[in-house]
Amino acid sequence: MELLRDRKNLLVVAGLGSTAWDITAAGDSPLSFPTWGAMGQAAMMGLGLALAQPRRRVLVVTGDGEMLMGLGALATIGVQRPANLSVVVIDNERYGETGMQTTHTAHDVDLAAVARACGFKESKIVTRKNQIGPLRSLIHEKRGPLFAQIKVKAERLPLVLPPHDGVVLKERFRAALLADVLPEKL
Ligand SMILES: Cc1ncc(C[n+]2csc(CCOP(=O)(O)OP(=O)(O)O)c2C)c(N)n1
């Protein structure tokens, strides 16, 4: 996953399903927090982390179905406006995990426009591979909150599963975060 290349000490929260497998396929890290089953929670977890750790950058990577289930999170992020939070939706226009049923984004619901209307500083739709590099730079350098919706093909890829135990995931994330040296500036 190009988006996570050389991620430094970026904190990464993933939604359930494909995005949890994707961030693991990119190289598992204790600074990754993939969610198992908790649909609709990823952006709010990212917001909590961003507010609690204002000198660290936080990236939420989630699916369109997961984001749609917790749409109110975008409004709350728009009100809180944490400069250190990015939300990236990997949009296959499907509930892939449960049988590829179409989601609202297959019917012209525009998540990037919703995020913009909620007050995200920057919000974009990404449709080409060569836009991922610049997006990665924004995640590391720009003051947010930033929202991006990456349109992808609906396909089933081999699964690379993270550890399955929620307590293990929480404890290793917490330990790594607290042991990590704070960056000098955001
Ligand atoms: C509250 C709740 N409802 C339904 C589910 C079942 N469920 C698990 S994954 C998933 C689809 C997720 O879709 P999306 O976020 O678009 O990710 P994709 O699988 O397409 O990558 C659903 C409906 C769940 N885990 N929790």
Image (cartoon, rainbow, N blue to C red):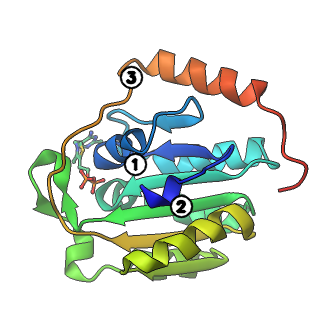
Write down the residue under mark 1: 40
Amino acid, disc 1: Gly
Q: Is residue 58 visible?
A: yes
Q: Secondary structure at mark 3?
A: loop
Amino acid, disc 3: Pro
Quadrant in which the C terminus appears: bottom right
69 to the left or right of 34: left
2 or 1: tag closer to the N-terminus: 1
84 to the left or right of 181: left
13 to the left or right of 36: right
The crowd level at tag 2 (other Cα within 10 Å; few <14, some 14-19, many 20+) is: many
Write down the residue under mark 2: 87
Write down the residue under mark 3: 163
The crowd level at tag 1 (other Cα within 10 Å; few <14, some 14-19, many 20+) is: many
Amino acid, disc 2: Val
41 to the left or right of 160: right
Residue at coordinates 70% horizontally, 52% vertically from top-left? 57
